[in-house]
Image: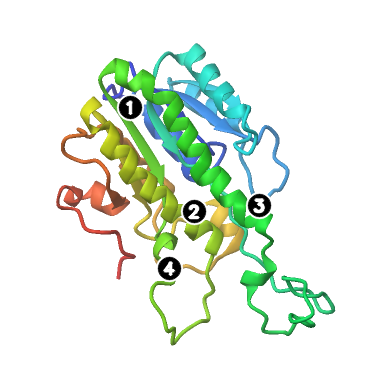
Amino acid sequence: MTSRLDGRAAIVTGASRGLGRAIALALAAEGAAVAVVGRTEQVWDERLPGTIAQTVADIEAAGGRAVAVRADLLDRDDIPRLVDEARNALGPITVLVNNAAFTAPGRPPKPGEQARPKSKAAGTAKPDWPPLLGTPLSAYRRHFEISVFAAYELIQLVCPDMIAAGLGSIINVTSIASRMPGDGPYADRSGGVLPGYGGSKAALEHLTWCAAFDLQGHNVAVNALAPSKPIMTPGLSYYAADFKDVATADEFARAAVELALVDADTVTGRTIGHHQVLDGSFSTFSPPQPDA
């Protein structure tokens, strides 16, 4: 335990596993009191281990202070409630990490299914039918509800605490997916894309700029933090594998801690790769790219 964040209270969403869990542990190790927010109170799939109670228990075992707050960011009533619970338990919130996300990779229609959209023109599904057309609008919308709309509301709800304290840090966890696949045409289309996930991260980065612009005068830094390399969290491993050059959740979490400590007059409104934070080069920022 160290003390760089002593006296600070933080909310971390999606903190039962993966990056959220690692960030919650790292903030607590620096002295912050942490509200560990998530839906998972019981493990329902062995491929997705971890609960909010387990994260809190690990923080407390290391000498830190934390509280588990069960919340579903798709439930609009849960968002103000989770902030109230965190504030009542830990005090004014001066660090917010918007980490929770949703991924629906889409699927081609099953053999014999009619492809979306259902119309006479669409006809019967073909084997090479684009996965985009297998993702229903409800799933596409859910990415934005969790990654963007909930983040927007959480920022609104915690900012009065930050403004009253005269300092604050908001970290929005983003991804290189926000810039993929980039401009076409595409010589290689073997990898696939995630329009809902990547699109919501692009919107989150724009929200980062706007919030940073409005809050800089109150000494509240707002930044987006992206993995510089793939990080094999349980969530990513659920959908993908075989990445050869990867980073760890712990090093990403160390970068989040450093961003929680930046001065809003120096570093705000940026999308930063976590390696740029760890090596100090984020002070001369360029957009994050996957390492060669």
Based on the displayed image, in which of its 4 quarters is residue 128 positioned? bottom right
Residue 32: x, y in percent? 37, 23
Check if mark 3's residue and mark 1's residue have beta carbons within 8 Å.
no
User: What secondary structure is marked by label 1?
Assistant: loop
Query: What amino acid type is highlighted by mark number 1?
Result: Glu
Q: CA distance from mark 3 to mark 2?
A: 24 Å
Q: CA distance from mark 2 to mark 4?
A: 12 Å
- Determine whether, in the image, residue 59 is placed left or right of residue 272: right
Which circle's residue, 3 or 4, is located before the other in the chain?
3
Up-down relation of residue 75 to residue 102 (above or below): above
Outermost residue on the front side: it is: 120
Residue named by callout 4: 180
Which circle's residue, 2 or 1, is located before the other in the chain?
1
Q: Is residue 250 visible?
A: no
Residue sitting at 47 percent across and 42 percent down? 99
Which circle's residue, 2 or 4, is located before the other in the chain?
4
Residue named by callout 1: 30
Based on the displayed image, in which of its 4 quarters is residue 176 positioned? bottom left
Outermost residue on the right side: it is: 112
Residue sitting at 54 percent across and 64 percent down? 194
Q: Nearer the viewer, residue 168 or 50?
A: 168
